[in-house]
Amino acid sequence: MDKNTAMDVEVEAHPFEPFLPQNARLLMLGTFPPSPKRWCMPWYYPNFQNDMWRIFGLLFFGDKQHFVDEAAKTFRLEDIQTFLQKKGVAIFDTALRIRRMKGTASDKDLKIEEPSDLDAMLHALPHCKAVLTAGQLATRVFSDHFGIHETPVMGSYVEFSFEDRTLRLYRQPSSSRAYPMRVEQKAEIYRPMFEEFF
């Protein structure tokens, strides 16, 4: 798109509040939620086709349907929030304001107008030991901000410094169905990280 066309594309503000439990040891960061027409619930990973909550179900309960309400075609939001609060998992995204250049949630179609305040998030999470980025754009935004020059191999991590803390940046496969991998395979790549922290 040329600049004039880009200016015609609406700027969207992030629709959700950061979920930052005080006990969080892990911070999960995506790029930005899909448009509301794709939501089955008003929270993170809201597209019913997205596999994030199935990955959690598989790894923690041995059942990819654990957080799924199949009849209503949605996820069990209250159960997810209670579980994450108890385990110490924080969630937000790397972008506060974006333009959807082609109307999709695909990383390649998003233009970030205002990144999230990543420093403030880590300040709010004094027990955080690791950050998970799911997707290339989230990984790039986070790495650029903290001067991380080595991109982790999928499923692995690199260490980085934030003030007087040493944390890990994990790169994991996207939970989107557009990423060509079965949910069971994705879960196995996520597994070592969750076993390390939970």
Image (cartoon, rainbow, N blue to C red):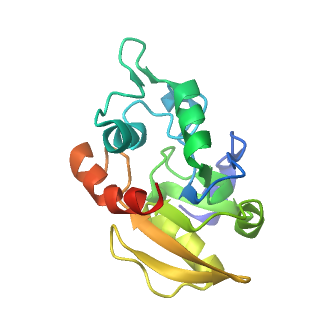
The correct choice, above or below, for 42 with respect to 69 in the image is below
Q: Is residue 127 visible?
A: yes
**How many numbered marks appear?**
0
* Quarter of the figure with residue 7: bottom right
The correct choice, above or below, for 88 with respect to 148 in the image is above
| Residue 38 appears left or right of 164 | left
Question: Residue at 64% across / 49% down in the picture?
Answer: 9
Q: Is residue 41 visible?
A: no
The location of residue 179, given as percent across then percent down, is: 30, 52
The location of residue 196, given as percent across then percent down, is: 42, 63
The location of residue 155, given as percent across then percent down, is: 33, 67
Question: Residue at 67% across / 63% down in the picture?
Answer: 127
The location of residue 52, given as percent across then percent down, is: 41, 43
Q: Residue furthest top?
A: 71
Question: Residue at 46% across / 80% down in the picture?
Answer: 158
The correct choice, above or below, for 151 with respect to 66 in the image is below
Question: Residue at 65% across / 58% down in the picture?
Answer: 95
